[in-house]
Amino acid sequence: MANVSEPVHSAAGAGGAGHDDHAHPSFLQHHFDTPAQQFYASKLGMWVFIATEILMFGGLFCAYAIWRGLDPDIFDQAHHFLNKIMGASNTIVLLFSSLTAALAVRSAQVGKRNLTSFYLVVTILCACIFLVIKYFEYSHKFHLGLLPGHCFGHPGLSQAIQNGEEVGTCLRVHADSAPVMPEWVRAVDEEGHVTVLPPRANMFFGLYFVMTGLHGLHVLIGMSILIWVLYKNVKGTFSPAYFTPVDLGALYWHLVDLVWIYLFPLLYLVGKPE
Amino acid sequence: MSAEHTHEHQHETLAHDGDGAVHVHIASTRFYIGIFAALICLTVATVKVSYYDFGQANIIIAILIATMKASLVAAFFMHLRHDSLFNTLSFIAAFLFLGIFILLTNDDLGVRQHDREGYVQHISQSTGQEAPGGEPATSATVDDVAGEAPRGGAGHEKKE
C-alpha cells in the first residue's frame, strides 16, 4: 500500500484568523480548552453513537441469523426474488457516495470550500439515486405480493389499495376464503424461474423490508445531515482549523454505507445459485 | 508504509502537540480513489462468487468479503487508521457485543426445539398469520422438560 500521504499542517492560517486561533477561536466552545480537545471529544461522541447504531441494526441481524438458521431453504428460495443487479448497483452507488463524502472531508481539511460543496452535492445526489432504485425494487415486490407478515402473498393487495379498501379488513376476508397460494406463487423470480414459496417465506420478506427500510430511513437522515453541512459550508463556517461537522456528517454517511455492505450480500446473494 | 509513518510522527499526533490545534492525517485524493477501486473489486467479487455454490461456505464467504469491505471503509474513509485508538475500540466493542447477543440468542433457541416445530406446522396455510411466537413458550417448555432433568426456573417448581 504505497499511499501518498499529504500531511498538511492545518492549525495556522485558518481562513485568515491568524493568531486568534490561539486566543479564542469563535468555534471553540467554552467548556473545551483547545480546538483539538473539542475535535477529539466530538469524534469520540460520534463513534460511540455509531456503536449504538450498529447495535440497533444488530437486533435485526440477530433476527436474520436466527430465522435463517431455522429455515435456510426458505431464505434460499425467497432471495431469488431480489434483483442482484439492482442490489449491486445500489452498492456501487453507495460506495461511490462514500468516496465523495471522504473527499468532501479531505477538501474541508485542506480548506477548499467550493470543492467540499461539490463533493457534498454529489454525495446527496447519490443518496437520491439509491432511493430511486430502492423505490423500483419495493414497488416490484408490492406488485408481486412479496410482503411482510400476514400481507404476504396477497394477490389482490395492490388492487385493494387502489380501490381504497381498508387493507386490514380485506386481508381478514381473504383469510377465510380458500387458500390463495396457487394464485400468486407462480410469480416469476428475477432470473426467470417460477418458484413456489410457502406462506412462511413471509419471514424473509419481513426481514428484507424492515432491514432495508430502517437502512432507507438512515439514508434519508444522512441526506438531511449532509444538506445541513452543505448549507453551513456554503455560509463559510468551516476552515482547516474547524471542519468537525463535515467530518461527523461524513462518518454518519459511511455508517449508512457500512450497513449496506452487510445487507447486500446477506439479503441478495446468500443462498444456492440456481 | 514506512514513509507514511514518518509523516505521521511529524504531523499526526493526538495529544502531544502543544498548540492545541487540530492536526489530522490527510490522505491524497488518489489514495481515496484507490480504496474506492478496491471496494468495487470486492463488490464484483462477491457478486461473481454468488453464482457458484459452496454449500455452507456461501454465507461465510459473503460475510468475509463484506468484512473486508467494511474494514477498508472504517480504516480509511472513516479515518480510524489515523484516529485515536479508543475510537477504534468503541467501534469494535459494538461488534463484540453484537456477537455475544447473537450467540446467546442462538443458545436460547437450542432449548426451544418444540417452538420451532410449532412454527413450521401451525402456520396458517392460506395466510401465514400464525407466524413466529404464536405458541406460548410455557406449553413447549413443560413438554420439553418432562423427559429431562429438572432445570432451574419458576415455571417448573409446582411439578415437583
Image (cartoon, coloured by chain):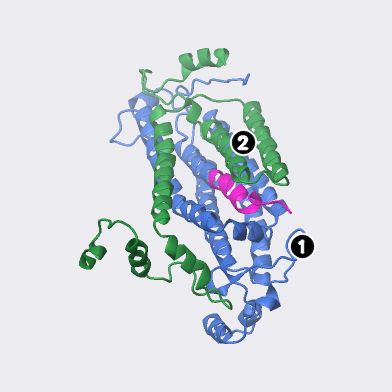
Chain colours: A blue, B green
Q: What is the magenta range?
A: A257-274
Query: Magenta segment: does it hold A192?
Result: no
Residue A102's x, y, as percent?
57, 36
Q: Nearer the viewer, mark 2 or mark 1?
A: 1
Q: Circle 1 — which element?
A: loop
Instruction: Pick whichever, A185 or A244, lies toward us.
Output: A185
Dot 1 crowding, Cα within 10 Å, few <14, some 14–19, many 20+: few
Where residue A146 sits in the image (x, y, percent)?
A: 63, 68
Splitting the image into 4 quarters, where does residue B60 fall?
top right
Q: Which residue is mark 2?
A: A115
Q: Chain of mark 2?
A: A
Name the foreground residue: A184 vs B124.
B124
Disc 1 residue type? His
| Nearest to N terminus: mark 2 or mark 1 | 2
In the image, what residue occupies the spot 55% across and 51% down? A223
In the image, is A145 to the left or to the right of A210?
A: right
> Can residue A42 be seen in the rendering of this structure?
yes
Please provide percent x and percent y for residue B157. 21, 64
